[in-house]
Amino acid sequence: MYDFVIVGAGFAGSVLAERLADAKYRVLLIEKRNHIGGNAYDHYDEAGILVHKYGPHIFHTNSTEVYTYLSKFTEWRHYQHKVLASVDGQLLPIPINMNTVNELYGLDLDAEGVSAFLAERAEKIHPVVTSEDVVLSNVGRDLYNKFFKGYTKKQWDLDPSELSASVTARIPTRTNKDNRYFTDKYQVMPLHGYTRMFENMLAHPNIHIMLNADYKDVISGISYKKMIFTGPIDEYFDFRFGKLPYRSIDFKFKTFDQEQFQETGTINYPDDYDFTRITEFKYLSGQKHSKTSVVYEFPKAEGDPYYPIPKPDHAALYQKYKRLADAMDHTYFVGRLATYKYYNMDQVVAQSLMVFKKIAGLDQVVKS
Ligand code: FAD
Ligand code: UDP
C-alpha cells in the first residue's frame, strides 16, 4: 500500500515525492516518458554535449526558499542569460533597454533620454488588459511591431491583442544598459545538469519509480491512499468540458563542427523564419567542447502540451475543471499542466513546497 501515487516526474512530482518520502510516506511515482525530470530533462547528445530535450531551461528565482531547497540536490554554476533579437538586419538586446534603442535608431541617449523617447511613443491605454496593451503602453508601436508582434504570432498563433497581459509582461522594459534577460537574485544552472539533480532528489528508499507507464493503464492494480496529479487537468477529467488548449513545439537539434555557433545563449527571430529562437547549449552549461549543439524551436498546435495559453476564455474553461479538482478530497493537482499556469520552474517548486506544507498540515490534523 502506497501513501501517495504521484503522476508525473517533473519538478512538481519530484519535489513532492522527495518531501513526502522525507516525511516517511511511501510514494509511487508514475511517469509515462522513459525518463524523470519532465520538461527540464537534459542528456548528453551523440557528440557528448549536454542538451535540453524539451527546449532551453534557464533557472532563475528571487525565492531564497526555492534556491535553498534545490541546493540540497545540486551544486550550481552562475549563469546570466543574454538574448539578442534579430531585427532589421541587426542583433539587438531584448528586453528592450538603452542599448537597444540607441543601436536601433542610431542615437546616443542616456537613461533619461531613453525614458523620454519611450514616453513620447508609448500609447495611453487604460486599463491594460491584453499582451498588445502591455507593450504599446510601454514602448509604442514601432518597437512593438519589430520585437513583439511577429514573435508572439509565431509562438502562440495569436495576435498579442488576443493574449492576456501576463504573457508579454514577462519581458520588462529598461532604460539602463542591463543586457541580461533576467534580473533575479539567483541565476544559476545545476552544475551537472537537471537530470542529475532529479536523480539526487528521487534517490530515497521510500520512493519507487515506474517509468514508461501512463497512470491510467496501471492505476487499477495499485493500492494507494492519495494521488498527486501533475499532468494536464483536462485529460484527468476525460475532457469533460472540452479540451484546454496547450501550445506545443518541435525542437530541432543541430551539432556543428565548430566551437561556437552564435554570439550569445539565445537569439530570437521575431520576423524571419518559422522558428522563434535558437539556443546554443554550451553557454548555459559552460561545457568546453570542440563542437557545439543548438536547438531551433518551431511552435505548433498539436503535440506534447508545453505551454498553457493565457487567454480569458481558456482561464474560464480551466476554472470549470478546477472546481471539479477542488471538490476531490484525496487528489491534489500541482504544476504547470495541472493548474494551467504559465509557470517557470521556480514557481512550480514554490507551488509544490506549499502543497506539501498543506498536505503535511492536514495530515497532522487528521492524525491528532
Ligand atoms: P512537467 O515538467 O511537464 O512534468 C509533468 C510530467 O507528467 C511529464 O513528465 C509528463 O510526461 C508526465 N505525465 C503527464 N501525463 C501523464 C500520465 N497520464 N501518466 C504518467 N505521466 C504523465 N522554466 C524556467 O524556469 N526557465 C526556463 O528557461 C524555461 N524554459 C522553458 C522552455 C520550454 C520550451 C518549455 C516548454 C518550458 C520552459 N520552462 C522554463 C518551464 C518549465 O519547463 C516548467 O515550469 C516545469 O518543467 C514544469 O514542471 P511540471 O512538473 O509542472 O511539469
Ligand atoms: N516575446 C516577444 N519577443 C521576444 C521575446 C518574447 O514577443 O523577443 C513575447 C512572446 O509572446 C513570448 C513572451 O513574450 O511568448 C514570453 O517570452 P519568454 O522568453 O518568457 O518565453 P518562454 O521562454 O517562456 O518561451
Image (spheres, rainbow, N blue to C red):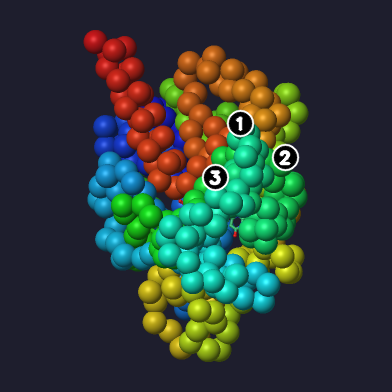
Query: Please, what is the three-letter code of the amino acid marked with disc 2?
Result: Glu
Q: In 3D space, how far apart are the residues under numbered discs 1 and 2 (Cα atoms)?
A: 15 Å
For disc 1, the marked residue is 127
Query: Please, what is the three-letter code of the amino acid marked with disc 3?
Result: Ala
43 versus 139 height, above or below: below
In the figure, is residue 249 to the left or right of 19?
right
Query: Please, what is the three-letter code of the amino acid marked with disc 1?
Result: Pro
In the figure, is residue 237 to the left or right of 100?
right
In the figure, is residue 73 to the left or right of 307?
left
| SS label for mark 1 | loop
* Residue contact between numbered discs 1 and 2, judged by CB atoms under 8 Å: no
Nearer-the-camera pick, 284 or 167 = 167
For disc 3, the marked residue is 169
In x, y percent, where is residue 292?
51, 81
In x, y percent, where is residue 76?
29, 62
In x, y percent, where is residue 200?
32, 54
Judged by depth in the image, the label closer to the viewer, 3 or 1, is 1
Dot 2: within a 10 Å radius of its alpha carbon, few (fewer than 14), some, or many (20 or more) residues? some
Residue at 59 percent across and 70 percent down: it is 104
Residue 214 shows up from this direction = no
Q: In 3D space, how far apart are the residues under numbered discs 3 and 1 (Cα atoms)?
A: 14 Å
Residue labelled 2 has its Cβ within 8 Å of some atom of ligand 2: no
In the figure, is residue 198 to the left or right of 155?
left
The numbered mark, 3 or 2, whose residue comes first in the sequence reads 2
Judged by depth in the image, the label closer to the viewer, 1 or 2, is 1
Residue at 55 percent across and 89 percent down: it is 257
| SS label for mark 3 | helix
Nearer-the-camera pick, 234 or 119 = 119
For disc 2, the marked residue is 162
Residue at 27 percent across and 44 percent down: it is 64
